[in-house]
Amino acid sequence: MKIERTTIPMQSFIYGFSLSADYSECYQMFTDKKSVTLESCLSLFSFKPKWVDFLYKLRNLLVKPLGLKTSTDEITNINPQKGEKLNFFDVLERSETEILMYANDKHLEGWFSLQYEPDGNKHIVRFITVVSFHNLMGRIYFYTIKPFHYLIVRDMLYRMCKH
């Protein structure tokens, strides 16, 4: 299974936010697993490999003195609906095939979309990130974490497609 960087689909919830953003990316992976659904993909948010858990704890430790929001260790609602939360992300939109999440802090705001799309005998799973910077700290923060963000997105896509 191979992860590809691709364009953000115009029909996605997140597309409109990407038009004026400072940064956007879309990674996708094809799978032939019939059991892959949006719900099964979301369930993997409740499990973090130890190396990802370490990165989140390190991030929380470093950004707390700066007054930035920190994430919680445990995700209790693994199937959030529109208007609910997934950790510190607000769920803005939800359908059978896509969830759009949003987080805003004093340094940046980010939109994240998880999409599942049946495509004949295969399924496409996409993770889309859109970021707008509020200030210089937002740029510095994002470009510092960007390599780790990619590793986490890649790991999540692999786990979602193998699930």
Image (cartoon, helix red, strand yellow):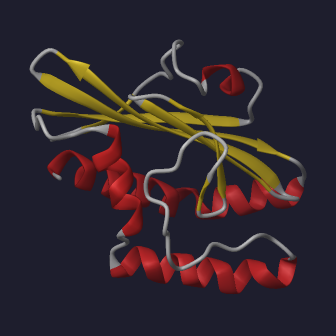
Would you say 106 lies left or right of 11 here? Answer: right
- Residue 139 or residue 46, whichever sits in front: 46
Identify which residue is drawn at 88% across, 55% down.
136
Above/below status of 61 relative to 3? below
Q: How many marks?
A: 0
Identify which residue is drawn at 50% across, 23% down.
8
Give the image quarter of residue 21: top right
Give the image quarter of residue 105: bottom right
Would you say 154 lies left or right of 81 here? Answer: left
Identify which residue is drawn at 68% across, 19% down.
16
x and y percentages locating residue 20 in the rendered image: 77, 24
Identify which residue is drawn at 37% across, 72% down.
48
x and y percentages locating residue 146 in the rendered image: 57, 56
x and y percentages locating residue 22 in the rendered image: 74, 36
* Quadrant position of the N terminus in the picture: top left
Would you say 89 lies left or right of 67 here? Answer: left
- Residue 40 or residue 65, whichever sits in front: 40
Above/below status of 77 relative to 110? below
